[in-house]
Image: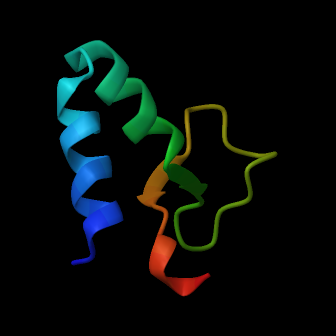
Amino acid sequence: MNKIKKDAEKEFRKLSKKEQRRINELKRIPVPAPGTVFDKKKTAPRKKKWDEEDE
């Protein structure tokens, strides 16, 4: 892991737990269950963690 990522992780740990939770929620993307469309489903969609390494 490079120095920038280590520094970023240290700064992230300094944040409040509430702020960490909010940021982690933003990293997750909605994913429909197999064979389901968002428009037809009234409950909240499942979420999958965003893979930052693909970019």
Quarter of the image with the C terminus is bottom right
Residue at the image position 26 percent from the left and 67 percent from the top = 3
| Image location (x, y in percent) of residue 52 | 49, 71
Please determine whether, in this image, residue 43 is positioned above or below residue 38: above
Residue at the image position 46 percent from the left and 81 percent from the top = 53
User: For residue 17, what is the image quadrant?
Assistant: top left
Residue at the image position 67 percent from the left and 42 percent from the top = 41
Quarter of the image with the N terminus is bottom left
Near-viewer residue (2 or 47) = 2
Residue at the image position 31 percent from the left and 63 percent from the top = 5
User: On the picture, is 55 further left or further right than 16?
Assistant: right
Furthest-right residue in this view: 39
Circle count: 0
Q: Which colour scheme appears in the figure?
A: rainbow
| Image location (x, y in percent) of residue 26 | 53, 39
Please determine whether, in this image, residue 31 is positioned above or below residue 46: below
User: On the picture, is 19 further left or further right than 42?
Assistant: left
| Image location (x, y in percent) of residue 44 | 55, 34
Near-viewer residue (55 or 35) = 55
| Image location (x, y in percent) of residue 18 | 29, 14
Please determine whether, in this image, residue 43 is positioned above or below residue 30: above
User: On the picture, is 37 further left or further right than 24?
Assistant: right
Furthest-front residue in this view: 3
User: For residue 19, what is the image quadrant?
Assistant: top left
User: On the picture, is 20 further left or further right than 48?
Assistant: left
Near-viewer residue (13 or 51) = 13
